[in-house]
Amino acid sequence: MTSWWARGVAVLIKTDRVTGVNLVYGDKEGRVIVIDCMYETKNLRIINIYAPNGEKERKTFFIEISKWWEGNCVIIGDFNVAMTPTDVSKNNVFKGDVSRGALKDLIITKQCLDIWRLLHPWERAYSRRQIVLNRLKQSRIDLSLVTSSTHTRQTK
């Protein structure tokens, strides 16, 4: 039995830069929240996620949330999967994961960019740290994805 205190996502908005905030969707499990807003006169969708730990459940989750990825979109949160070998520490193993393939397909289909990796192509930095058998294992599983149209618009 899982406690409802175990997870939850939120979005904090700085109201002097963002207007017209509208909650589009929030699931009962606290794993996803979708918000539409205006940022500097442009429509923007913000999706914050906390993906399941289980590989198969995570794959299904990524496929299900893809319906919300539209227009100028920022997708942030805990994806619970490392995307590249650079995203895991030397004490960690980069192993096969069916959800990674599903997420990569969505990133390609939705024309998204991993902003942090774009700015730091070879840097090893981690958002998750855990000690297993007295060894520190680290991975970058928290991502900030943006649709390429959003990235282009913000860099002009």
Image: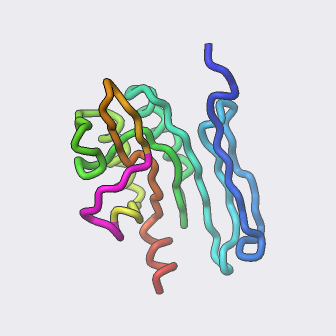
68 on left or right of 125: right
Say which quadrant the N terminus sits in: top right
Q: Is residue 93 above or below residue 19?
A: above
Counting the numbered discs, the total is 0
Q: Is residue 2 above or below residue 58?
A: above
| Predominant SS along the magenta part | loop
Residue beneath the point at 50% across and 71% down? 150
Percent from the top left, x then y, of residue 82? 34, 44
Question: Nearest the camera: 142 or 102?
Answer: 142
Residue 116 is situated, as x and y percent measured from the top left of the image, at 40, 63
The residue most toward the top is 1
Residue beneath the point at 46% across and 64% down: 147
**Residue at x 31%, y 47% (from the top left corner):** 83
Residue 47 x, y percent position in the rendering: 58, 52
Q: Position of residue 40 (x, y in %)?
A: 66, 80
Q: Name the residue: 52% across, 54% down.
A: 76
Residue 113 visible in the displayed image: no
Residue 110 visible to an observer of this rendering: yes
Considering depth in this image, is 82 or 126 the residue closer to the camera? 126
Nearest the viewer among 26 and 119 is 119
Res 21 → quadrant: bottom right
Hey, which residue is sitting farthest bottom in the picture? 156
Magenta part of the protein: which range? Answer: 118-127
Note whether 145 is above or below 100 in the view shown. below
Quarter location, residue 152: bottom left
55 over 124 or under it: above or below: above
Say if the magenta span includes residue 5.
Answer: no
